[in-house]
Image: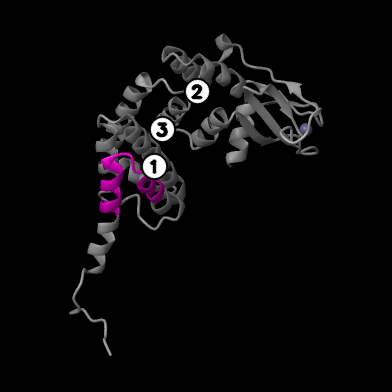
Amino acid sequence: MSQVTNNSPGPRADEAGSGRPAALLERAAAGRDGQAWSDLWTELYHNGTLEASHPLVLPALTDMAEGDDADTAASALHLAGALLVQADQRYETRELRDRRAPEVARLLAAAHRWRQATGDRNGYCYLLEAVLNLEGDIHWGEELIWGLISEEYELECPDEDCSAVLWVVIGERGFFSTSEDYALSDGVETLPLHPAAPGALDGLGRRLHGLALADGHEDVAHALTHAFGEATCPQCERRCSVVGQVIARSG
Ligand SMILES: [Zn+2]
């Protein structure tokens, strides 16, 4: 009968532990390996079976973000930003962000370079998300940007007596709010959105709108005026800030 002892052959536990992230990061850096990125997201972000604070992770993602391959860089920036926001929230400290400040600064600079270079609409939105997540001032960048990409927000009416589901649709299907499943039935009641006038935007809305225009993404800028505008609840007719309900929903 074999017994596991300290003298047993084979890799030590800590070596096996660092081998896995190294191998995955190497595969991701080699490019065109969607499975490697999927595994990294699963293990680092969704399941936490690998630690975002592992000494290889942020330096490797930073190198990829500064490389020549746009897809690899975008993937690295998206994951790095998400990991930092998750760490902020999970540990309620900015310890990882502070300890990795040199890499975070390099990642942010790379995100701004790629933002100015990408022509793809959704790729551009993900780069805006990476900028927000790397800056770390808000924790709801993912929810804000996902609505731009999916062209809808699923929110809740802020009126406590109503609390209806509020769909805010921004994109090819139109610009409206509804409380019914508009995808499944014709003739659902929809109400027009009230976009913010670009000149009236302030704060984050003004900044993102300005970036999108400067980078040649007019349709993203237009969508942002709706995300930072208002919607009307079809159930109780109360008007509310779209981004305000995105924030409320993100907790
Ligand atoms: Zn309502």
Residue designated by label 3 = 130
Mark 1 residue type: Leu
Question: Rounded to the nearest whole Å, what is the CA distance between mark 2 and mark 3?
Answer: 15 Å
Find residue 84 and name its label.
1
For label 3, being within 8 Å of ligand 1 is answered no
- In primary-sequence order, the first of circles 1 and 2 is 1
Q: Nearer the viewer, residue 211 or 36?
A: 36
Magenta part of the chain: 21-40
Q: Are marks 2 and 3 in contact (CB under 8 Å)?
A: no
- In primary-sequence order, the first of circles 1 and 3 is 1
Above-or-below relation of 81 to 237? below
Quadrant (top left/top right/bottom left/bottom right) for the N terminus: bottom left
Q: Is residue 241 left or right of residue 136?
A: right
State the image quarter where residue 175 is shown.
Answer: top right
Residue placed furthest toward the top: 199
User: Quick check: can you spot residue 36?
Assistant: yes
Residue at disc 2, secondary structure: helix
Q: Quadrant of ligand 1?
A: top right
